[in-house]
Amino acid sequence: MAFIDYYKILGVDKNATKSDIKKAYRKMARKYHPDLNPNDKEAELKFKQANEANEVLSNDENRKKYDKYGENWQHGEAYEQAQQQQRQSQQQRQYQEGQQFEGFGEGEYSDFFESMFGGGFRQSRSNVKFRGQDFNANLELNLRDVYTTEKRVLTVNGKNIRLTIPAGVQDGQVIKIKGKGGPGINGGPHGDLLIEFKIVNTTEFKRDGSNLYKTVTLSLYKAVLGGDIMVDTFDGKVKLKLKPLTQNGTQVKLSGKGFPKYKKDGQFGDLYITYNVELPKKLSDKEKELFEELAKLQ
């Protein structure tokens, strides 16, 4: 496989910050996502390459290995561990023979490197198993998408992975799917897939954990006189009885009308309503007269 320059793929330089890399990846992911480019093989390839680049460069350890080993970065740790094991074996053998340990020679080092990356381990090292690389993916969802449990298909490195997303997932939450990462080396276990959720809130509700918050505007007359009002909750309307002389900033709690609690079926947080009493912007002559009479009564 030809060497892929991950920095070039994302259009950033080698000194790019994690924030720069994240922004570049999200831009490419939105542009080339398979859902937006059905049956477009070129877009699918670019999406796959962007995912690979992000998985490597957004992880400090992986990026360090990539900068050091280039295209062979995934095997860098295996190389270092095998090198250390061979040194220990050679040291032990020479110690037993009464010889002074001299370590790797330049020629032996190059031979090892070539066998490691050019055709696999020699037979003596073939029993060394290493766990595969973890993959990282981002999934952007609307707040209403995570109000109920739903199924999604996520494309990672060209493979479709079916997910069941529990209701109540939080913004920034990471879910691990075991064994869906990179393949292991020499029969080692697969890595894991780590999915970070980005929850976009375009609703009138503010979310804090499983609780929701909302401001409801009242007219001055309704606040003074009280009565029944209809209020939107996240999943429908409810009728509330407003007390006369409700003050600006008054807060009421609607138990169980908040957001689902993560992985707790049937359990919900609360909805907190804050009343904002709005003064009239304009008064008729009659209204002004009535207010003046009220002022005299006070």
Image (cartoon, helix red, strand yellow):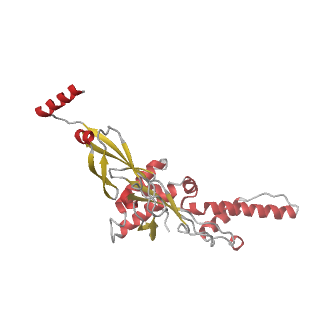
Q: Quadrant of residue 188?
A: bottom right
Q: Given the current orientation, which residue lies at the most extreme top position?
A: 296
Q: Which of the two residues, 142 or 265, is positioned nearer the viewer here?
A: 265
* Image coords of residue 124 (percent x, y): 72, 72
Q: Is residue 5 visible?
A: no
Residue shown at the point (35%, 39%) measured from the top left: 249
* Image coords of residue 33 (percent x, y): 37, 63
* Image coords of residue 171 (percent x, y): 44, 54
Residue shown at the point (64%, 68%) measured from the top left: 115
Above or below: residue 208 compared with residue 261:
above
For residue 233, side relative to residue 4 (left or right): left
| Number of marks in the rendered image | 0
Q: Which of the two residues, 153 or 281, is positioned nearer the viewer here?
A: 281
* Image coords of residue 140 (percent x, y): 40, 58
Quadrant into which the C terminus falls: top left
Q: Given the current orientation, which residue lies at the most extreme left position?
A: 285
For residue 129, side relative to residue 19 (left or right): right
